[in-house]
Amino acid sequence: MSPEAEPIEIRAQGLGKAFGQHWVLRGVDLQIARAELVAIVGMSGSGKTVLLDLLTGLLEVSEGRVLIADHAEAGSPLVELSELDEQDLDALRMHWAIVFQHNALFSATVRENCALWLRENARMSEKEIDKRVRWALKAAALDVDSVIDKHRDALSGGMAKRVAVARAIAMDPAIIFYDEPTTGLDPIVAGEIHGLIWDTHNLARADGTRRTSVLVTHDKDLLRRLRPRVIMLHKGGVCYDGPYDEFGKDGCGIAGEYLSAMPVLHARNPG
Ligand SMILES: Nc1ncnc2c1ncn2[C@@H]1O[C@H](COP(=O)(O)OP(=O)(O)O)[C@@H](O)[C@H]1O
Ligand SMILES: [Mg+2]
């Protein structure tokens, strides 16, 4: 590792997951460093969400292991997820935020949605929480005064996604995970969310360290615009792992097939 290299945030080794006899993932190795923007792609049913759930400890691994940087400790040492009890896992999760595919906002106002985690975890006064919530909504490019007292059910799809991202930003996470952040949004709103993901990735953290973003997506425009590192899953394993600009050029046959189903991307990669 060169001296200027960023520390490792996530390392999966020989990772596998079976449901009954059905192995969804097998032998997955990957490593994600701090400050990386990584997109996990693959056909529907290829195990993208399962991988995200394994990396975040929402699912138990069947084989292999997941190591994650523990930001509660000095130097953020890597710890093995399966060796943590619920309490340690909760402490670890303090430093991550997950933006779920369907946002997982609870039935209350925008303010309550953004404040709840802070109230339960951040030892902040109500005044400080209010300030933080407003700052996060603004960072998510929302008009704070017009949106803060709206009920979840009054939000459009794009606004609900912004609120879900604002809630994540309010936590100032070291790692932010997104599952299909633009699925179901119209192309214009999806384009705005691409910008929001980019801005959130680059938003300075309170301690001055860089944020890591991991997203599951099959949005070709997102890949084209954000040019992330791409990890492609196929037949239970990683069939491509590298820069977006090389994606589909390295002999991973399935990546070519995947790209040909993605006309915009393909147009960028003739031959
Ligand atoms: N809880 C579960 N029980 C059984 N099978 C599951 C479960 N979750 C996911 N699967 C299976 O794992 C495979 C990958 O699912 P998923 O990760 O959701 O795919 P995607 O890449 O579309 O996100 C699918 O075949 C799915 O049926
Ligand atoms: Mg999925």
Image (tube, rainbow, N blue to C red):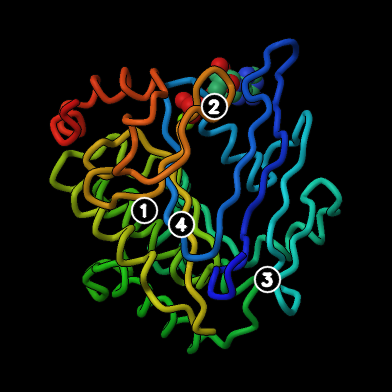
- Residue type, label 4: Ser
Circle 2: residue type: Gly
Name which of mark 1 and mark 3 comes first in the sequence.
Answer: 3
The residue type indicated by label 1 comes to: Arg
- Of 82 and 100, nearer the camera is 82
Q: Nearer the viewer, residue 224 or 129?
A: 224
Between the C-alphas of marks 4 and 1, the distance is: 25 Å
Q: Residue at x 71, y 21 (%)?
A: 18
Q: Is residue 175 left or right of residue 8?
A: left
Alpha-carbon distance for marks 1 and 3? 31 Å
Mark 4: secondary structure: strand
User: Contact (CB < 8 A) between labels 1 and 3?
Assistant: no
Give left or right: position of 110 versus 120: left
Element type where label 2 sits in the image: loop
Q: Within 8 Å: ligand 2 and the Cβ of disc 4?
A: no
Give percent across and percent down for residue 136.
38, 73
Identify the mark at residue 196; answer none if there is no mark.
none
What percent of the width, then of the height, locates residue 165?
A: 39, 59
Residue 106 visible? The answer is no
Q: Earlier in the sequence, mark 3 or mark 2?
A: 2
Query: SS for tag 1?
Result: helix
**What x and y, as percent, mark residue 154?**
28, 51
Specify the quadrant of the image occupied by residue 166: bottom left
The amino acid at mark 3 is His
Distance, label 4 to label 2, CA atoms, is 19 Å
User: Sequence order check: which comes first, mark 4 or mark 3?
Assistant: 3
Binning the other alpha carbons within 10 Å of mark 3 as few (below 14), some (14 to 19) or many (20 upward) gives: some
Residue position for label 3: 71
Q: Kindly report which numbered mark, 2 or 1, lies closer to the viewer in this rendering.
A: 2
| Number of the label disc, if any, that sits on residue 152 | 1
**Residue annotated with mark 2:** 47
